[in-house]
Image (cartoon, rainbow, N blue to C red):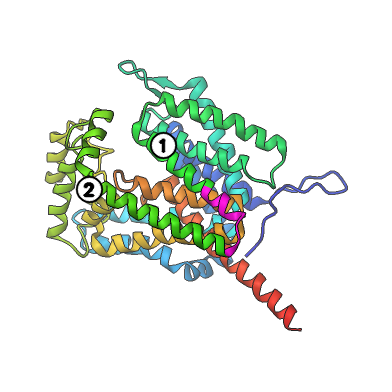
Amino acid sequence: MSSTNTHLPRRDNGVITIEPDVVLAFLALCGLVFVPVLGSMGALMFLGAGCALLVRRLQMQVSLCLTYWYIIALPAFCLLSTVWSEYPAATFRFSLQLIATMVIAVTIAATTSARVFARILFGLYSVAMLASVLFGDVRNDTGAWLGIYGSKNALAGAAATYVIICVAQVLDSYASYRYRLLAVMGLMVGVMLLLLAQSVSALAIVPPSLMILFLLLMLYRLSALQKVTVLTFAVLAAGLMLVLLVIFSSVLFATLLETTGKDVTLTGRTDLWRIALELIAERPLLGMGYQAFWVKGHSPAEALWYRFGIDGRSGFNFHNTYLSNAVEIGIVGVFLQVVILYGAAITTGLWALRSHRAEAALLFILVMMIVMVSFIEVPIFFQFSLRTVIAVCAFVFAVRGLAADRSTVQAKARLLAY
């Protein structure tokens, strides 16, 4: 497994060395970041660069799949669902695309460093945000900014992610002052676009994400006993907040509806969740096949499209990751997804606490943002999805980082033993 330099070292002869793995990772991620503009060409760019990376590291693919089998198990199960799928051709095609997406993500994380990955995201998102300012569209009815994404929610989600990335880059003590100044400028642009997008859900995610990030930075400066004390207090405070939320749920729910201007069904979400539960009860373990529900001609999907006025009959879901995916791949498939998503959250959190690295903290926050959104949207676990790639890469980076930390500790212990 090759290691990648964080910076491009300049040799004495004035030649700058460029790591091909980093270039291919950059091109692959570039395709996903600009999918809203490039469309299918963005997905093709991701596949092209990703497959070139796979071929370049062909000798390590079997080893990677065996090492990270708990990640590859999910797309493999999705492919297996072709056997019982109501639309086997669609399930087979989308499952192969998901396998390619996740294998490429694992390879990117295995051949680059987490810091390089974070800086690639910062650079690509910076260009996307700048393009949204210069060339983006605006909704005529509400004045909400759409950017290059064509949707205020999509722009708000990207801007929220960009804000967190910028804050992490500003707080990276290993970065140069010029680089951190660029991150400050990017932060201002990200906040501006986040406000212009007028998305309440995206605005609600950023403050807790920043709080978690600053809590991590505070924990970095504390001793082991102080960390245990602070974390214990945080858990107790979170438990108290949960109890208060349960007690005053009706009042808070009414306030939320009044503030956001939504109805009691959360714009139809509660109705969708009820329908999803009914569908899950029909096939609880295995579901009806990966991406085999929202298919044109499928009567239940057609009925929901008609009911909610989705004329394009695409881009619609049950607005809950666990319910939506349980409909398609059952409880077994959702369990595999939970292993990846929450496994990534736990390992990145542990890595951030042990390593005190800005990139580790950033990956933890990005995964936690996906976790928070997963209860009201379906942001992950589909082909050519940037968030899917980020979650998988975060998991692999954290596993590698924790293994490296253990090796360092063991090596020091052996030296002390001598």
- Asked if residue 144 is among those painted magenta in the image, a careful observer would answer no
Counting from the top left corner in percent of width and height, residue 42 is at 46, 39
Say whether residue 363 is left or right of residue 13. Answer: left
Q: Residue 247 got which mark?
A: 2
Please identify the residue farthest to the right as the structure is shown. 12
Residue 90 in view of the camera: no
Structural crowding at the residue carrying mark 1, measured as other residues with C-alpha within 10 Å and reported as few (<14), some (14–19) or many (≥20): many
Q: Quadrant of the C terminus?
A: bottom right
Mark 1 residue type: Gly
Counting from the top left corner in percent of width and height, residue 210 is at 49, 42
**Highlighted range, magenta:** 215-224
Question: Which residue appears at 44% of the width and 38% of the height?
Answer: 206
Which type of secondary structure does the marked residue at label 2 adopt? Answer: helix
Which type of secondary structure does the marked residue at label 1 adopt? Answer: helix
Question: Which residue appears at 51% of the width and 51% of the height?
Answer: 363
Mark 2 residue type: Ile
Q: Nearer the viewer, residue 188 or 338?
A: 188
Q: Nearer the viewer, residue 384 or 181?
A: 181
Q: Residue 157 got which mark?
A: 1
Q: Is residue 410 above or below residue 185?
A: below
Q: Nearer the viewer, residue 194 or 241?
A: 241
Question: Which residue appears at 69% of the width and 47% of the height?
Answer: 174
* Occupied quadrant, residue 92: bottom left
Q: Nearer the viewer, residue 68 or 158?
A: 158
Counting from the top left corner in percent of width and height, residue 55 is at 56, 58
Q: Quadrant of the N terminus?
A: bottom right
Q: CA distance from mark 1 to mark 2?
A: 31 Å
